[in-house]
């Protein structure tokens, strides 16, 4: 098993989010151990689901919408997602140092704590790459009474902490945020929370109103006019999510409700109005925290009007610590960092963020042809 150079460990992380569009993978070098580790981005690779297997994206979206299916179909989907992960990991391997382990999030299909499902069979991945695969990253936190999400505030503490308080906002299927203390602070001071629908709503409008998978670069939104009344109506839906005080998941999508409010608008106006409502909801949620710098990540950063609206709301730009982390690969890199922390015995959910108890099991590791074992030592 490749172990890296000296005390440097290379781990490949994989993330497939609730936008259901594909898999991102990132290679990360880890120096040191536990909370004192430092992480460095090495390389990234992405694979749209339909490039991996025609029709895979639609099957994932159907499962996420809780459409009735069979156990056989669900098992086949888990296997096919594994094969897609193998493809993107092989692509990443062409440009990165060989890793010592893989940290794999899987595709979230159901999240209603204490029950959550991130689907992707780990065994085909472990067999193909011949390395340990860390998976089921949320399960230990859920079992300890936590929400199982968000987990990225834990890795953000390692990846981004700088000299001033900052917020990292991930513009994924849902928008979520981490608020970090200055570097040198204690992990217990980290705060993180889900906020509201983001790309799930924007992509739904693109599919149903524009006839395309997404609003590329936010071009339609830039060409539209924001409708004040509709913005307020959508904001009401989103604000209810932001005020829920828990992780968002199944039954929180509200995509149909939000989209129906915009049905009377021209397509470009609907896109512009949705962007305004999402940005306003995110900024309102961040006003409760002292934030001097803003880091944006996730697929939503490609929506230029959404990015501009958020940056206009918080004067400080990205801190120096954000330069090395490409926004598109932040979550995949986070999975790699979480994998390193799990290997070091650090539970992945922060009690102040997920609400878990003080004792939690760690995570599951699948060890290729050598068999499997579970790290179940408790954090005391």
Image (spheres, grey):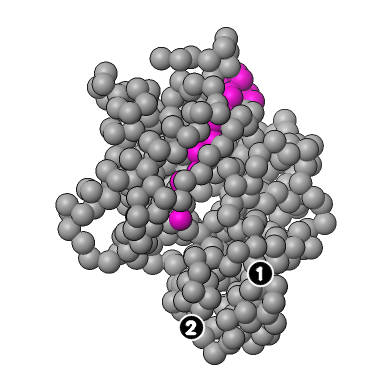
Q: Which residue is mark 1?
A: 219
Q: Is residue 262 left or right of residue 126?
A: right
* Secondary structure beneath label 2: helix
* Secondary structure beneath label 1: helix
Looking at the image, the residue that sits furthest to the top is 6
Q: Residues within 10 Å of mark 1 (few under 14, many from 20)?
A: some
The quadrant in which residue 228 appears is bottom right
Q: Is residue 259 left or right of residue 78?
A: right
Nearer to us in this view, 249 or 78: 78
Q: Position of residue 380 (x, y in %)?
A: 45, 27
Name the chief secondary structure element in magenta: strand
Q: Which residue is mark 2?
A: 260
* Residue 207 visible to the viewer: yes
Q: Residues within 10 Å of mark 2 (few under 14, many from 20)?
A: few
> Label 1 vs label 2: CA separation?
21 Å
Q: Which residues are magenta?
A: 21-38
At horizontal 37% and vertical 26% (from top left) the residue drawn is: 129
Task: Please tell me the numbered disc located at residue 73.
Answer: none
Point out the tag, 1 or 2, that comes first from the N-terminus.
1
């Amino acid at each position: 098993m490749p172990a890296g150079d000296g005390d440097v460990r290379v781990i490949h992380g994989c993330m497939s989010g609730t936008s259901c569009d594909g898999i991102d993978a990132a290679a990360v070098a880890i120096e040191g151990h536990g909370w004192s580790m430092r992480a460095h981005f090495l390389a990234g690779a992405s694979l749209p689901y339909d490039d991996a297997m025609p029709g895979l994206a639609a099957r994932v979206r159907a499962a996420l919408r809780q459409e009735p299916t069979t156990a056989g179909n669900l098992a086949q989907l888990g296997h096919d997602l594994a094969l897609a992960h193998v493809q993107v990991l092989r692509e990443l391997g062409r440009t990165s140092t060989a890793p010592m382990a893989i940290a794999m999030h899987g595709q979230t299909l159901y999240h209603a704590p204490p029950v959550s499902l991130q689907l992707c069979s780990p065994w085909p991945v472990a067999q193909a790459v011949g390395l340990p695969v860390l998976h089921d990253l949320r399960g230990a936190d859920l079992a300890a009474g936590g929400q199982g999400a968000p987990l990225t505030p834990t890795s953000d503490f390692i990846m981004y902490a700088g000299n001033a308080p900052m917020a990292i906002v991930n513009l994924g299927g849902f928008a979520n945020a981490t608020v970090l203390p200055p570097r040198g602070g204690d992990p217990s001071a980290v705060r993180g929370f889900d906020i509201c629908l983001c790309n799930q709503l924007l992509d739904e409008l693109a599919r149903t109103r524009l006839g395309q998978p997404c609003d590329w670069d936010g071009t339609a939104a830039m060409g539209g006019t924001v409708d004040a009344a509709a913005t307020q109506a959508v904001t009401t839906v989103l604000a209810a999510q932001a005020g829920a005080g828990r992780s968002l998941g199944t039954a929180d999508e509200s995509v149909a409700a939000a989209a129906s409010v915009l049905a009377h608008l021209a397509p470009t106006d609907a896109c512009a109005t949705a962007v305004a409502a999402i940005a306003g909801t995110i900024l309102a949620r961040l006003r409760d925290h002292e934030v001097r710098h803003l880091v944006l990540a996730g697929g939503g950063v490609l929506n230029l009007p959404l990015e501009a609206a958020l940056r206009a709301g918080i004067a400080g730009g990205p801190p120096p610590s954000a330069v090395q982390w490409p926004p598109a690969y932040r979550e995949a890199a986070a999975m790699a960092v979480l994998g390193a922390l799990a290997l070091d015995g650090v539970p992945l959910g922060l009690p102040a963020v997920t609400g878990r108890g003080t004792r939690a099991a760690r995570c599951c590791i699948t060890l290729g042809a050598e068999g499997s074992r579970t790290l179940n030592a408790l954090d005391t």
